[in-house]
């Protein structure tokens, strides 16, 4: 058994914890509890005893039998430890072949434990106390059974059982007679002895050998390191002594298993190669330009996953041309993937769909005048730089660019990649509008440093019903939105000219109502009611500012 080494590991760790020697000298039990208890819980130690130089307990931590992992009984002042040989060896500072740590069996009032003992040294190497780390025999035999799947019994040197996993069956291991014990100890370096047992109507064969710990000097003589005997019991089976019939049965079973393995291999090979050949044939068709092929994807194994993935690839190729024409580079890759899934599942359709969305219109005021004095190449560079600043802002808030028209930009929110409530689309659009104004200000700073005239941009935001779908012909189609809401947004953007040459954004009363309680995240300046071309009723208009605390 290697239990002694496991206990030694914890002993060395605790003995070398900073602050332990000082706490032992001061007999500060509370400080020792704070230092040692986490280690005991982490290493699942059942008993940790800290003694002073007289062998009296400064603090003792013992795990409660039926408690949780962190439940320990804590005592102090016990004097029983000084009676144990392996503790006396430490108190007398014996050193045996360079070793100052010892092990032994303790039959204490709190149970039968195997302990490892060692000194606690201060910074000068002086012993200030003794540490004991122990494990109950009941726990030890149970853990050994879990590791070996055999029943374990521990006996003292008189052959009497002191711990056994057979106790779980309500049975105690049978005691060993003196002659058997003597035979085991006499032949321990040569062989182990066995005996038969009948426990709970099951026949067991028990292999018995010595139970040892490290030996140490007691005075001028060496202490016997045999604590007792340990028995390992295994149930007898027909495989232990096979007869002629059993051998024949094993041979027949082996042949049958061999035939089944070959048959299964042939079957699996056919199951794998047939779908793979289908994929190969379909790949050849795709190479010739045929995108109408499909591969059967039955089952849930890896080959079926391959066939399903191949079909998805073909579906993606069929959708690719339309998909790229529809959205180009106006949305992020994540949004593109969601849009592709929406079209594939039928949640988004090319025919017109009535929905509620928020529309944004942006335009550079006085751009026609600016462009009259510059070359077409310069104008094109200016516009590309301008839209390069605005498009990422719009897409970052979930907006979709519907079209570019000269220096104007039309975008919509709340439809793609999936419909969202009007409050959410209005909120995202207002955030995008303010971020666009910031981006234009940064662009104007760079333009002024280059000697270029600044841009004065106006942004209009409106919320309402729109018709979304594919617009165009059968071979050329553009996904966009139309409706009175779009027309009103264009007129609304034109009202920003009343605000002079500065960048500004305005929203309609419909967007204000859609914001609901989120309107308080912005500062809204009323511009009164305005007549909008194409609408009979007047439209209440508000200038959009960021909230004061965020300005």
Image: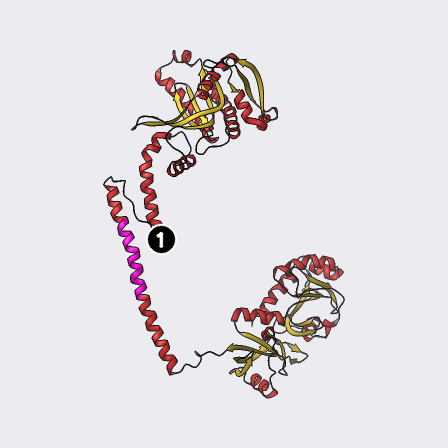
In the foreground, 307 or 92: 307
Is residue 334 toward the left or the right of residue 530 in the image? Answer: left
Residue at (67, 59) in percent of width and height? 37
User: How many numbered dots are placed on residues in this image?
Assistant: 1
Colour logic: secondary structure
In the foreground, 84 or 516: 516
Residue 277 covered by magenta stretch? yes
In the foreground, 493 or 218: 493
Q: Write the start and end of the magenta stretch as one range.
A: 262-278
Name the image quarter holding residue 161: bottom right
Can residue 130 be seen here? yes
Magenta region's main secondary structure?
helix
Residue at (55, 71) in percent of width and height? 145
Is residue 169 toward the left or the right of residue 251 in the image? Answer: right
Name the image quarter holding residue 368: top left
Q: For numbered disc 1, what is the local secondary structure?
A: loop
Can residue 328 be seen here? no
Relative height, residue 353 to residue 362 (above, below): below
Is the N terminus in the top left, top right, bottom left or bottom right quadrant? Answer: bottom right
Counting from the top left corner in percent of width and height, residue 430 is at 52, 25
Residue farthest to the left, as pictured: 288
Counting from the top left corner in percent of width and height, residue 188 is at 54, 82
Is the C terminus in the top left, top right, bottom left or bottom right quadrant? Answer: top right
- The residue pinned by badge 1 equals 299
Mark 1: give few (<14), some (14-19) or many (20+) Cα within 10 Å: few
Relative height, residue 23 to residue 537 (above, below): below
């Amino acid at each position: 058994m290697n239990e002694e080494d496991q206990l030694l590991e914890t002993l060395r760790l605790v003995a070398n914890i900073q602050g332990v020697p000082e706490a032992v000298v001061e007999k500060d039990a509370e400080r020792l509890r704070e230092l040692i208890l986490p280690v005991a819980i982490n290493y699942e130690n059942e008993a940790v005893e800290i003694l002073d130089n007289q062998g009296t307990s400064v603090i003792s931590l013992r795990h409660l039998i039926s408690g949780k992992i962190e439940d320990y009984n804590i005592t102090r002042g016990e004097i029983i430890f000084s009676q144990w040989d392996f503790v006396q060896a430490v108190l007398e500072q014996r050193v045996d072949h360079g070793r100052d740590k010892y092990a032994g069996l303790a039959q204490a009032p709190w149970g039968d434990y195997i302990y490892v003992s060692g000194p606690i040294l201060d910074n000068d190497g002086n012993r200030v106390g003794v540490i004991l780390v122990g494990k109950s025999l009941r726990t030890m035999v149970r853990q050994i059974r879990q590791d070996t799947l055999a029943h374990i019994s521990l006996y003292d040197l008189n052959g009497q059982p002191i711990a056994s996993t057979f106790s779980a069956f309500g049975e105690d291991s049978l005691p060993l007679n003196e002659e058997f014990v003597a035979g085991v100890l006499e032949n321990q370096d040569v062989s182990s002895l066995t005996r038969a047992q009948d426990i709970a109507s099951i026949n067991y064969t028990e292999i018995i050998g010595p139970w040892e710990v490290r030996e140490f000097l007691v005075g001028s003589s060496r202490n016997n390191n045999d604590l007792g005997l340990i028995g390992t019991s295994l149930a007898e089976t027909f495989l232990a002594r096979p007869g002629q019939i059993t051998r024949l049965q094993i041979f027949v079973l082996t042949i049958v298993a061999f035939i089944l393995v070959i048959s299964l291999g042939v079957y699996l090979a056919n199951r794998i190669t047939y779908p793979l050949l289908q994929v190969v044939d379909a790949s050849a068709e795709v190479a010739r330009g045929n995108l109408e092929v499909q591969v059967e994807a039955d089952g849930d194994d890896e080959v079926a996953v391959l066939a399903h993935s191949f079909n998805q690839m073909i579906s993606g190729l069929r959708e690719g041309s339309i998909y790229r024409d529809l959205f180009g580079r106006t949305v992020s890759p994540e949004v593109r993937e969601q849009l592709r899934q929406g079209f594939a599942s039928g949640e988004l359709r090319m025919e017109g769909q009535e929905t509620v969305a928020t529309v944004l219109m942006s335009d550079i005021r006085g751009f026609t005048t600016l462009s009259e004095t510059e070359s077409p190449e310069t104008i094109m560079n200016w516009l590309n730089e301008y839209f390069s600043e605005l498009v990422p802002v719009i897409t970052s808030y979930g907006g979709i660019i519907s079209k570019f028209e000269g220096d104007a930009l039309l975008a919509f929110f709340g439809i793609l990649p999936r419909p969202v409530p009007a409050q959410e689309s209005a909120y995202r659009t207002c955030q995008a509008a303010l971020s666009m104004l910031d981006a234009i200000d940064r662009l104007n700073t760079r333009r002024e440093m280059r000697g270029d005239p600044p841009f004065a941009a106006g942004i209009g935001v409106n919320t309402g019903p729109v018709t979304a779908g594919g617009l165009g012909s059968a071979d050329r189609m553009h996904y966009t939105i139309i409706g009175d809401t779009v027309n009103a947004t264009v007129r609304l953007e034109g009202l920003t000219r009343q605000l002079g040459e500065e960048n500004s954004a305005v929203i309609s009363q419909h967007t204000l109502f859609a914001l609901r309680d989120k309107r308080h995240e912005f500062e809204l300046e009323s511009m009164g009611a305005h007549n909008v071309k194409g609408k009979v009723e007047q439209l209440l208009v508000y200038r959009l500012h960021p909230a004061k605390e965020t300005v």
